[in-house]
Image (cartoon, rainbow, N blue to C red):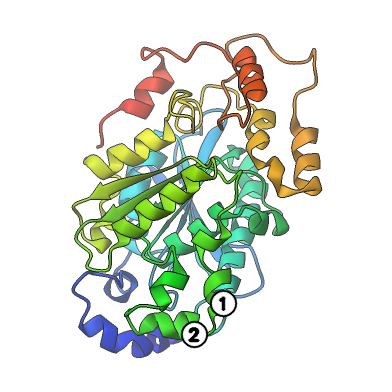
Amino acid sequence: MAALLAGLAIIAPAVAADRDGLFPGVVAAMKPLRVPAGVRRIADVAYGPDARQRLDVYLPETPLPPHAPVIVMVHGGAWMVGNKAMPQVVENKAARWVTRGAVLVSVDYRMVPQVGPLDQADDVAHALAEVQRLAPSWGADPTRVVLMGHSAGAHLVALLGASPARALRAGAQPWLGTVVLDSAALNLNGLMRQPHARFYDRVFGKDPALWGAASPTEALTAGAPPMLLVCSTQRADDSCGQSQRFAAQANARGVQASVSRQDLSHLEVNATLGLAGSETDAVQAFFERDRGGGALTGEALLHSGRRHNKGVACARFEGGGRRWRSACSAARPKPGNRRRSRATTRPTFPATTSATRSAARARSTTAPSAASPTAAVARSPTT
């Protein structure tokens, strides 16, 4: 609570003039979280020694289906406030996806000024690694993880998604994709050189070297996992323009990235995700993208009755260096031991070359029919 009050004092002038709802942690952090019906919480799992290095795990009260996916959610709050138990971070997302057989993990991380934004990104990377380590104990699949964040949290997951090497150094494995919920800090070099809210100076300072190091645009590398960038058209600081320019640069590097423009406030982009509407539809479609779209397959998330081919998923990350290639190679199924039943899935990521695309297609089976029980769960309307 002391850290929260200190953060509020720092950003109070900006909050007073906050017409775009850019500080979701300020009021909502004071409201109690209501865990949705049918969902249970494992609270305050440690992933580091600091009191802020904790995460909450949300599981269905019924047993998880085989190979259950995991959504790792990183809260916002101007890098200075907010916490993992804010209602808009958890409630509607848990009600939508946990009740359908996924795991939701909400992550806390250390705040500015205790640490800087790069340390915060490292916190999220270590949290991701810990989630993947613990996932089997929850009955979930550590290879079927999507990383998601809002506002400041969106910047942090975009930084990790743009350059997976940072997560690799923290011990993480490849993940399926990254969902960026309304960040206006994708191009920090541009942002900090033009008129901007004063709180950015408190977070990123005056050193262009830090701006570049913490900028997802500068970090962007070929081989990054697919990204969906959701942006608010109501914001005055052009988060949609940044998202579109970032996606264009990602696509030019061979990285799958798309933008979903939403007529929602910055706060609503986070709070209403999971409710019926075009934003939830866009995120669900990203989770279920087929091979023709080139990112995630229908089995990749919320289609838990299929076996996930980790070896193919690793193909997108082989630009990450010898250690990453070695870890991925060890995970690949050995020739002759692959199952030839319908449980052998299509690849999670697009192949990077025509040869690997052909090989991936050879390993693929027919997509599950719309009549299958797991497909019905994935496509069922919001409750």
Quadrant including the C terminus: top left
Q: Position of residue 263 (x, y in %)?
A: 18, 52
**From the viewer's perspective, is 180 left or right of 105?**
left
- Asked if one can make out residue 206 in the rendered structure from this viewpoint, the answer is yes
Which amino acid, by three-letter code, is at mark 2? Gly
- Asked if one can make out residue 43 in the rendered structure from this viewpoint, the answer is no
Few, some or many C-alpha atoms within 10 Å of disc 1 (few <14, some 14-19, many ≥20)?
some
For label 1, the residue is 210
Q: Position of residue 369 (x, y in %)?
A: 41, 12
For label 2, the residue is 205
Q: Label 1, label 2: how many angstroms apart (C-alpha)?
A: 8 Å
Q: Observer-nearest residue: 107 or 113?
A: 113
Few, some or many C-alpha atoms within 10 Å of disc 2 (few <14, some 14-19, many ≥20)?
few
Q: Which mark is residue 104?
A: none
Q: Observer-nearest residue: 203 or 377?
A: 203
- Identify the residue at horizontal 56%, vertical 32% (top origin): 349
Whether residues under marks 1 and 2 lie with C-beta atoms below 8 angstroms apart, the answer is: yes
Q: Observer-nearest residue: 11 or 250?
A: 250
Judging from the image, what secondary structure is the residue with disc 2 in? Answer: loop
Q: Observer-nearest residue: 190 or 47?
A: 190
Quadrant including the N terminus: bottom left
